[in-house]
Image: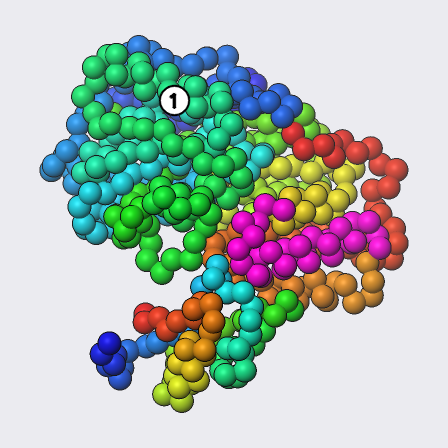
Amino acid sequence: MTAQLHLVDTDLAEVPAGPAAQVPAQPLFGAPVYYVGADSNAISELGVEDLFAHRRRFGHRPHLTGAAGAAFIDTLEDIGLTGRGGGHFPVARKWRTVRTAGRNAVVVANGAEGEPLSGKDAALLQLRPHLVLDGLACAAEALDATDAVIWLHEGAEATRASIVHALAERRAAGLIEPQMRVVTGPARYLSGESSAIVQALSGGPALPQFRLASAATSGVNGLPTLVQNVETLARVALSAHSPEAFATSTLVTVAVPGRRVVLELDRATQLGDAIGSVLGSTPLQAILIGGYGGSWAPWVDVSDVMLAESDMRDRGLSLGAGILVPLGAGQCGLEQTASIISYLADSSARQCGPCVFGLRGVADLVRDLAEKSSGRRDLPRLQRFLAEINGRGGCHHPDGAVRMVASAVTTFAADVSAHLAGRCLHDGAAHLGQRRG
Amino acid sequence: MAEPAVNVIQRLRVDAVRCDGVGICAHLAVELVRVDSWGYPIVSRQPLSARSLRQARAAVAACPRRALFLATD
């Protein structure tokens, strides 16, 4: 734990000199956040930042109506803030599209984290609710929105209770800000998909839809709509309080058997140091970067890659929403992959043929491969399925699944050969963690 | 609806949410549509030529799910 705190301290020390250095970068959390087992309550030694503590740290939120809103979008462009829901799309560009698309915009804080292994968004909503709400209020003002929504999963009780309480605190304090309301969608993997949120808020089911126009142009009931991840909005709030306070940190969720840890690290941190701060010197063979729809990579190839998305992209990777799943030396990557693709196939919204049938077909083939029961032609068939499915869903769910499986076949090539020959390279080895945390 | 100008690039697109894999499109637009391992259309992403535009229009008109359409860049 001290290693993580040290990295954050280093981050603070490295703020460039000059006028900008007078306000140190503010952390989102300031300490690691833990989830124990499958529990969804975020635990941090620093606890919940209530409105009083939040105002003591940041003062009053600047109001961003009119010209101040346009100026703030320029600030967002200057600091290069990108979306932290996984897409890393430039925030300023999205906001400008909404602003120019017309009146009566809708702004949505997307807190419906789909992946069971994620945790940074729930941690922010539970522990730093006022940063997220400040960010949403900033967006609503800068985009002159007539509706501001916090979109959550049904059943995410700790998260919902935190936000409802925070909204009540703000009302009691008489804050002058746009009205914000909580709306929940079904606790499904794809309820947080942008087009699913748009359809649900338009009165339809919370399912992804095929759209030619972006939500920013034509979203909820045809109105310009901003759907922004809650971490992104928390960073928007930091930037609004002081552009210099904008943190150059990255949030990652490291998922290991029995627990998940949300770390706030400088984006120049190497993967090896990030994982090492959680697992110590445990020998690893591979890592899944970017979560279930991310990519497997051999540990030796990527332990020196920095968390910065530009560095990731140079290596053909993406940090996505920041989920990192290390694979111990004794574990079978094909077994892990089979379990994940099965989950992804089950999580299909069951709307598009290539996703409903294709992902099931892929999941069955990967399961056979993991169980060493593949036929001679199954590997080419798997490759054909992956090529056929890619890019053909109404949303990007199948694309992520294809990416993950394709990267597994490459990363675990030796395991694939062994399994096809009826052997497993890890039989008899200690299985450090087949359970999902 | 007015005909688009000659130099407008059009592509055949499929709304995968609406598509039920009926497959008439693959018969009417043989140069543009093939079916995947489960019978769902894989649609060419190439700009439509004058000749393929005729095939594309026939496929769009015949789709019982109204899942096919012509999109302009």
The residue that appears at 75% across and 63% down in the rendered structure is A379
Is residue A350 covered in magenta?
yes
The residue that appears at 37% across and 73% down in the rendered structure is B70
Report whether A362 appears left or right of A168.
Answer: right
Report whether B42 appears left or right of A329.
Answer: left
- Of residue A379 and residue A185, the one placed in the foreground of this image is A185
Q: Position of residue A145 (x, y in %)?
A: 21, 38
- Of residue A330 and residue A91, the one placed in the foreground of this image is A91
Q: Position of residue A381 (x, y in %)?
A: 72, 66
Compared with residue A382, is residue A98 higher up or lower down, i.e. above or below? above
Is residue B42 covered in magenta?
no
Residue type indicated by callout 1: Ile
Q: Position of residue A347 (x, y in %)?
A: 59, 45
- Of residue B11 and residue A369, the one placed in the foreground of this image is B11
Q: Quadrant of the N terminus of chain A?
A: top right
| Residue sitting at the far left | A67
Residue B9 falls in which quadrant of the image? bottom left
Q: In this orientation, does residue A301 appear?
A: no
Label 1: chain?
Answer: A
- By secondary structure, the bulk of the magenta-drawn segment is best described as helix
| Residue sitting at the far bottom | B51
Q: Position of residue A118 (x, y in %)?
A: 54, 33
Report whether A25 appears left or right of A7.
Answer: left
The residue that appears at 36% across and 88% down in the rendered structure is B50
Residue A105 falls in which quadrant of the image? top left
The stretch in magenta equals: A346-373
| Residue sitting at the far front | B64
Report whether A60 appears left or right of B14.
Answer: left
Task: Tell me the residue that label 1 is attached to.
Answer: A163
Compared with residue A364, is residue B37 higher up or lower down, i.e. above or below? below
Q: Secondary structure at mark 1?
A: helix
Q: Residues within 10 Å of mark 1 (few under 14, many from 20)?
A: many
